[in-house]
Image: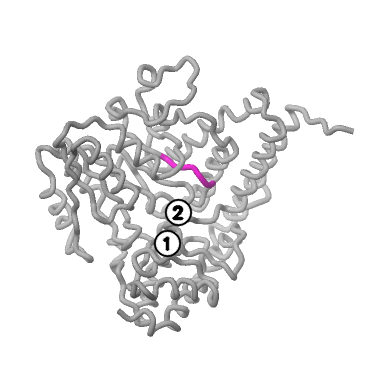
Amino acid sequence: MPLSITRRSILQQAGAVAAFAAAGGALQNIAHAQATAGEDYWELVRRQFIFPETAVPMNCANLCPSFQSVADKVETLTRVVDYDVSFNNRAQFNETLKESRAKVAAQIGAAADEIALTRNTSEGNSIITNGLDFRPGDEIVIWDQNHVTNNEAWDIRAKRFGLKIVRVSVPKVPESDEQVVELFSKACSDRTKVLTFTEVSNVSGLKLPAKKLAAMARERGIHCHVDGAQSWGALVLDVHGMDCDSLAASAHKWFMGPKELGILYVRNGRAPQIWPNTIGYTGDIKVELDLQNALKFETLGQRDDAAVAALGETADLHAQIRPERVQARVTELASFLKAGLKDAGATLVTPENPALSGGVVVIEVPKDKQKTVVDTLYSKFGIAASTTGGLRLCPHIYNTRAHVQRAIDGVASMRELIKI
């Protein structure tokens, strides 16, 4: 007998996935444990992820695992779509895009119409790079520690249109926020149109004073774009408080959400001056005439409805754990890691002061030894790391102190290899 499924059962199946977290799964367990102190609470959080103890992720700067309930929702709703790809069935997802956008907007201090759901940080960065109008000779000030895709995108734009790129270097451990702001301020001129920087460097772990840099740019009429790839999901993020003009980030990093989704924040009033990169089908809506906010950057064509729906669930999980609690835990683990690595004989690239760093921790390792060190950490100690900047380790809320100690012990066992 052929399988028969009704619209009602489709909706019930989709609803059952959402109910998993709200009733019997991750959300309820975490909510009930809010009063639990110490490592017991974080052990519970760790159990919301399916990775084995033989492959512990500690490279959030590249990719994080999704919460299990988020991954389950993506899988189930993908099957819902594949079973019936009709407009009739997919109509149930019309509101999930709005709901997910509204939830992530609220968590980062933005209005819903200031957020476009993109594919990742690189796409968000490129919308700004390619969308602003320039004249030959205009200047773009960038941090030399920006993610390579961001800086290379500006290099390509400069080559095509005769722009001048000004790179700024800062001390390994800045003396003060004011020193950093002064270095960027001196790099700006009357021809500067954009200041763009990564709030937390993926190659050193250094955290820049984003709010103060944005204020300097605002005073000089310069568009301030922030790469928040290492901020969203790790730090308490308030884009209105930061007062930047735009910010891009990825859901697959510290936010621990579905893959191939990101956000682009564009402050209200700035979108009309930015051209969209992609124009998908919008029905009767004219992107340049009708959309004068961040939604004009979301006309990307067919979306992954399951992933978009799961983005909202990820936001719910962050709300249950609380962003300030996430940041405190990331800071705690990163500080524990830095102290242990230093005791193990490593030379830190990342500042020890938590005020100058996020969750990215980097130590010096000779170039020709980096792959050996990372491979050994994985094969013998079950810790997944990166060679970016030397040896990069990025602990998150799904990591326990025992995981971090294992990473420290692994580095200590290779003391001779990490000597510069």
Q: Which residue is mark 1?
A: 330
- At x 54%, y 67%, the residue is 56
Residue 221: x and y, percent? 16, 35
- The magenta segment is 258-263
Between residues 197 and 9, which one lies in front from this camera angle? 197
Residue 66: x and y, percent? 55, 52
Residue 228: x and y, percent? 36, 48
Amino acid identity at mark 2: Trp
In the figure, is residue 290 to the left or right of 167?
Answer: right
Q: Quadrant of the N terminus?
A: top right
Q: Which residue is mark 2?
A: 254
Amino acid identity at mark 1: Val
- At x 63%, y 28%, the residue is 90
Sort mark 2 into few (<14), some (14-19) or many (20+) by Cα contacts within 10 Å.
many
Is residue 197 in the magenta section? no
Disc 1 + disc 2, Cβ < 8 Å: yes
Look at the numbered disc 1 and give the secondary structure of its residue. helix
Q: Is residue 69 visible?
A: yes
